[in-house]
Image (cartoon, rainbow, N blue to C red):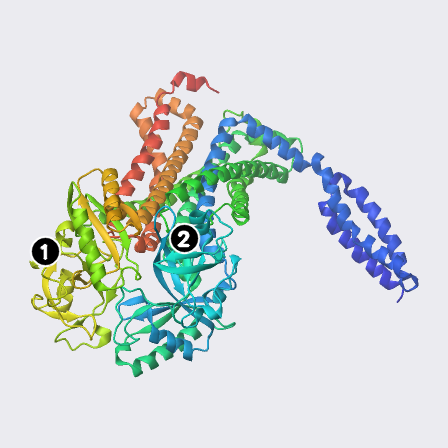
Amino acid sequence: MRDKKPTTRFHFWLWMIRLIGVIVPRRLRADWKQEWESELSYRDALLSEWDRLDWGAKLDLLRRSTSAFWDAAWLQTYRWEDGMIRDLRYGLRMLLKNKTFSAVAVLTIGIGIGVNTTIFSVVNAVLLRPLNYESPDRLVWIWGTLPTFREANHSLADFEAIQTHQTVFSDITAYHNTSFTVIGGAQPLQVAGLIASANYFSLLDVSPARGRVFQPEDGKPGATRVAVTSYDFWQKRFGGDPNLLGKTLSINGESVSVVGIMRQDLPPLAPGQSPELWVNPRQTVPEADTNIRVGADRYAEHHLRLLGRLRPAVTLAQAQKELDAIMQGLAEQHPNQKGHGARVVSLSEIFVGDLRQTLLILQGAVALVLLIACANVMNLTLVRATTRSREFAIRAALGASRFTLLRQLLVESLLLALVGGLVGSLLATWGLKLVLAMIPHNFLPSPNIALDTSVFLFTLVITLTCGIIFGIAPALLAAKSDLYSGLKESTRSASPSIGATRLRQTLVVAEVSLAMVVLIGSGLLVGSFFRLSAVSPGFDPNNLLTLWISLTAESYGTDPVRLHFVKNLTATLEGLPGVQGIAVDNSFPIQGTNSHSFPQIEGHGVSPDQKPLTGYHVVNTNYFETMGIRVLSGRTFTERDNDSSPRVVIINEAMAKSVWPDEDALGKRLRFDSTEPWSEVVGIVANVKHDGLQLADSPHCYSPILQRPWSFLAVAVRSKLDSAELVSSVIHAIREVDPNLPIVRIESMREKMKGALASRRLTLLLFNLFALVSLAMSAIGIYGVMSYSVAQRRQESGIRMALGAQTNDVLKLFVVQGMKPALLGIVIGLTAAFGLTRLLETLLYGVSSTDSTTFAAISLLLILVAAVACWIPARRATKVDPIVALRHE
């Protein structure tokens, strides 16, 4: 038994050496095996004496037993003279010899890889890369929900109930979005900020770059007001002053001490939310702005946003179930809470939003472009492999195996792919800069988009995959070529096999069908964009200069003071030369409504959850005339509609039809709070696209600013003066009224409308670019196949013409044969597009995803392009001299 064990071990190691020897260069393999088998025999003898060996000998034996792997790996340096290296050097020489083929193939695959890498960089940063928070998968938004609104703020009562009764969150924090007026320096500055609970930063588990964040004592009633600034704000406003900590800033007229500077890489909590200042509340819970009307109780005012961190192992479904129970209990205690709820959403989902589908669609489109590029290069390599059939036949006759020929062509394909990958990476570097320059502000939630390691790994994978895809089929066909036929035919007369011909036609079908899908998607987006651009906004956007002014609570804390400022501002701006009118609102059209409410309708006994969600606006007397909004019935506001006169409102047509569908709305009354008097409807105006051109008309209500002075003022100046001259005079006029007021986002209304469509315009531009590339590659593919077919059939063309065939007959023959795979591809592409374009439905406006006009137009376009691509080489076939063709061979 003692002799058998070493023998068994010896045979096991012999088997292992044979397995490892596969990676050893063939010319060294015999000597390497002989040496290691002798070594194994010696070690096997030692193993039989294992029990008598000391520990040093045992460790040395174990070390040497694993060195076969290292020896085999070290011998790879001798592969430079092996077949693989010879194939690399030979393949490189062949590619350099055929510069035109190599350049076209590299550029084609480079474009395909470049656009894929560019879009993947964005997808990776937005969809795949985890947020830069501790355990971001457990961070969730807790939205308020209303019957017609799924992303509402919470009231103080909501927050108290959730905080008291919840068991699924390790912590919950509340904050209020606002803007701060910072006074000091060259001019006052308005910055985006948050009034946040003291546990805001601890819940996010983030640390500052300098100083400290909020501490529990900062959340106690009457605590000293402190602030944390963003890193960018510290750099831009204070030049990175290292002594900023401990200094006092005038924020909204209040002295606030700076205690911390946040780190630079802190991501926003949602797209468009990049606060520059965080300030602790005066009380435990963040307070509302003075322009938000406080109701009779803590249920009425909804200004809080809630953020929670789930306990470990708690799912979103469990958290949602508990929130439903809490909000149901609150509704039972307070009738006005009926219809109010809470919705828990992961931070990543809010972070991505509607971008997920847009980015995935774009990534799918560029994937189709890459497939078309691969098909195109495969066609080129098929033609090239056919012209080299004699070369392969000679190599086979001299002893080269089919595996050797297959390896040679695969090596050449991988070389092409790698060079194409390098070109694609270079194009992606430029392309990403171009895309980022075109991306509108706050369109992407993550600003850190770059060609990082994961992107380069993605590029490497698709590069190698492409090399295998477009190289394997030509290599297999070449390896299976007939030796006798190849030796018999000359290079010029080498004819393709039936398999190669069918494969080329199949590739044309694939190219055309894939291009068809991308082109139809592009056509639908073009039609949608033009329809959306043609939508009437409900007002005249021409010759309007817009700007924002925020009145601080400390300087303008009462209605009379705010009212005096509005009158003074309006009179000053109206006195400027060339000014035709001034409009003041609490929000601008197109960009969204800042305030919504559920008005009580006199005489309508509807339950609280059935009140219409209404956009609420506070406007000046000349608002409708200045904005060019049509008055359908009744009147507009006058100077008599002030704080000493009965309350009045003007509603839009959508509200009149939804609230009083069968009655005249004029003279009806409504109110927004049970503690305030009723307001009479004195006018009905046309619908205005306050919340976006793509949305259906919804109820909106307007109150006179003389009765409800507001703190956030959206000011529009109508004038036909030059914009630069007007901006200067407007800023000077506002400075005369109050030099400490910041003026924000001065731009024309046309620029605002252009910005509102910026994301759609970018998607359209990219999709159209991909569609044009697809169309060009498909046309090149058809042209290439036809050119090769004409070149191979020159003698046939000459014989036909010698026997009396007319020029049109030969032309028709080649065009018809070339159009057959193109038409088949169009049919297949139409079928595929009919299903795939349904994914575009959320990006379309006024156009069906199966719009017959678009489908027909793109089909005709592709037929025309294919016909031209077939006609050009077919025309060359008609110019063949029959005598030359007959003597060619």
Instruction: Name the residue carrying label 2.
Output: 360
Q: Tell me the quarter of the image containing the N terminus.
A: bottom right
Residue 73 x, y percent position in the rendering: 73, 46
Element class at badge 1: strand
Q: Nearer the viewer, residue 868 or 527?
A: 527
Is residue 498 among the parts visible in the rendering? no
3D distance between C-alphas at marks 2 and 1: 44 Å
Q: Is 589 situated left or right of 381 in this image? A: left
Query: What crowding class fits label 1: few (fewer than 14 Cα within 10 Å), some (14-19), or many (20 or more)?
Result: some
Residue 60 x, y percent position in the rendering: 85, 55
In this rendering, which labeled residue sits more in front, label 2 or label 1? 1
Q: Which mark is residue 660?
A: none
- In the image, residue 376 sits, relative to residue 839, either above or below, namely above
Residue 775 x, y percent position in the rendering: 36, 38
Instruction: Name the residue carrying label 1.
Output: 631
- In the image, residue 841 sits, relative to residue 90, either above or below, namely below
Which amino acid, by three-letter code, is at mark 2?
A: Leu
Which amino acid, by three-letter code, is at mark 1?
A: Val
Residue 761 x, y percent position in the rendering: 31, 45
Q: Nearer the viewer, residue 737 or 138?
A: 737
Element class at badge 2: helix
Is residue 816 among the parts visible in the rendering? yes
